[in-house]
Image: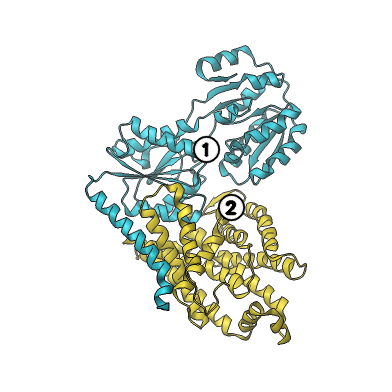
Amino acid sequence: MSKLKRFLPLILIFGSLLTLLGIKKIKEAHQPDLPTVGILQPLSHPALDEIHRGIVAGLASAGYHNHKNIEIDFQNAQNDQSNLRLMSNRFVTEKAKITIGIATPAAQSLANATKQLPIILGAVTDPASANLVQNNQQPGANITGVSDQAPIQKQLDLMQTVMPQLKTVGILYSSSDNSATSQMQLFKQLAKQKGLQVIDASLSSVNDLEQVSQNLAPKVDAIYVPTDNTIASAMGTLVHVTDKTKTPVFPSAETMVKDGGLATVGLSQYDLGVETGKMAAAVLSGRAKPASTPIRYLRKGHLVLNLKKAKALHITIPQNLVKTAKEKGAIIK
Amino acid sequence: MSLIISTIDQGLLWSLLSLGVFITFRILKFPDMTVEGSFPLGAALSAVMLQQHNLVLSLLVAFIGGCLAGLVTAILYNYFHVQSLLAGILTLTGLYSVNLRILGQANLAIGDQHNLYQLPFLQQLTVDQRLLLLNLIIIAVAMLVLALLLYTEFGQALIAAGDNPTMALSQGIAVKRTKTIGIVLSNGLIALAGGLVAQYNGFADVNMGIGVMVIGLSAIIIGERLLVGRHFISKLISIILGSIVYRLILLLVLQLGFNANDFKLFSAVILAIFIIAPQQKKGMTAK
């Protein structure tokens, strides 16, 4: 009896899971076999969820609809890296026609699990430096995709147009975010070439944001924030601090302007997803091969202005910018 | 089938982490949070050393790094009387910055050319066979070393220091020093596991430590339910089985295709079932 007791939880769990699996398999047997598209996301959060939404829309725009002519298998590792590998292997064994990795760790995990299945990268800033492709122009293997490299030069130009007196720029970024760190370095280099003073401040978690920004804001004329997932989710905290010192914040993503940034020439995460989905569709249909498809960069940044914020900070935005934003971008009043 | 094999394979690899957690949690009765810092520390050190193309050194450095991390926690706890959980949390918090410094960035890829799982003389085997063989060897060696260690005089002192420090002290065992060495070795092993996992996954990431504590404990909790022998060797084997069973359960949950966001909840519920279910009244189960 005691022997059985010991194995009770095991029998219970395996029994119920296997039963459910059996039911699922029987159900599936009655359905036509659709090609699988595996999407792997490392964790849930607004920007990444937005990319995921875009991917599904991008596939649909190219005629691939979930449950109709493809079966999308969406897996989310919930920030546990040991699950990434398990989920990548799952795609390989179910012989997915194509796999899509959102952000660097998911992409690396897929790359390690398969050298044959095509892998499409959604939002990896520099695939070559992450060792995912040989070079960004000629990937050369089973991987290609879309980079979320922000138009940094344009963002810097915008800052100087809006603030001609700009002398000292603060950069705020998360040190745990590879993409944000590499953007910070690039921005720093460009700003120094323009003769600006640069002070960079890093945070290791969202809890440091208030203190780090309180320390940075009084020292600088404006703050630049790269495409940083951590800060994007806490713009409210940052703006709360910078409003006190009347320091404008120039973020990299549109959503961050809506949340209280002043202006940006930004990429929309959703558009990144759509591009990724379209690329996946091209590979699915056999029109493109990952090896010879260069990494795609979104060139068209949207000019987004927050006029309400400009008023509060007593900053006059040049009329021609307002006109451009009205025609091709977005204005937040 | 190959999915089951690769899952068993991962179970084997991650059981190395559980063996490390076992030393502190079960033998020393010391809840050591350092794990979540020493695991990515091992990964970071290993990844950086591999850029120099030296495999043996990369694993050795990872092990030593983990030992040092454990030493910090042990000193805080044993000699400055910081509470056990707090001592580990202090170390793991500090290690975050250390790991970033070592990696130089948040995420560092490990090339295919010189990591353990890509050794040239193994290239005739298929990928599955290769990974399974290597992980079996790794875990067999780790178990053997650990089992032998536990049967030495030091090992017995370690067990005594954990079971009943007061009595151990009266038997002339230097409890503080013994505990310190135990925590050091445990974190060395955990960092080694981190280094191997990084090579297996092809990258090291500063966020690798998130949740590894639970993974390590899961295997121990499940393992204790599968097999409770009187000898330490059977306890060690049960941990490895527990680790494999844990992975297989996760695989099943995954195969059922639930909403990906509910994955964590399932893991928690399954573990809870194992913990709540009626306990055996012998061996080293939790009180």
Amino acid type for the residue under numbered disc 1? Pro
Q: Position of residue A93 (x, y in %)?
A: 33, 55
Q: Residue at x 72, y 76 (%)?
A: B176
Q: Position of residue A193 (x, y in %)?
A: 67, 30
Q: Is residue B3 visible?
A: no
Q: Quadrant of residue A21?
A: bottom left
In the displayed structure, B59 sits above or below A308; it is below
Q: CA distance from mark 1 to mark 2?
A: 21 Å
Chain coloured cyan: A
Colour in which the image shows chain B: yellow
Identify the image quadrant of the C terminus of chain A. Answer: top right
- Residue farthest along the bottom direction in this orientation: B171
Applied colour scheme: by chain
Identify the image quadrant of the N terminus of chain A. Answer: bottom left
Amino acid type for the residue under numbered disc 2? Val
Q: Position of residue B265 (x, y in %)?
A: 48, 53
Q: Residue at x 63, y 51 (%)?
A: B100
Q: Is residue B68 visible?
A: yes
Disc number for residue A46: 1
Which is more toward the observer, B120 or B207?
A: B207
**Which secondary structure, mark 2?**
helix
Which is more toward the observer, B50 or B208?
A: B208
The residue indicated by pointer 2 is: B206
**Which secondary structure, mark 1?**
helix
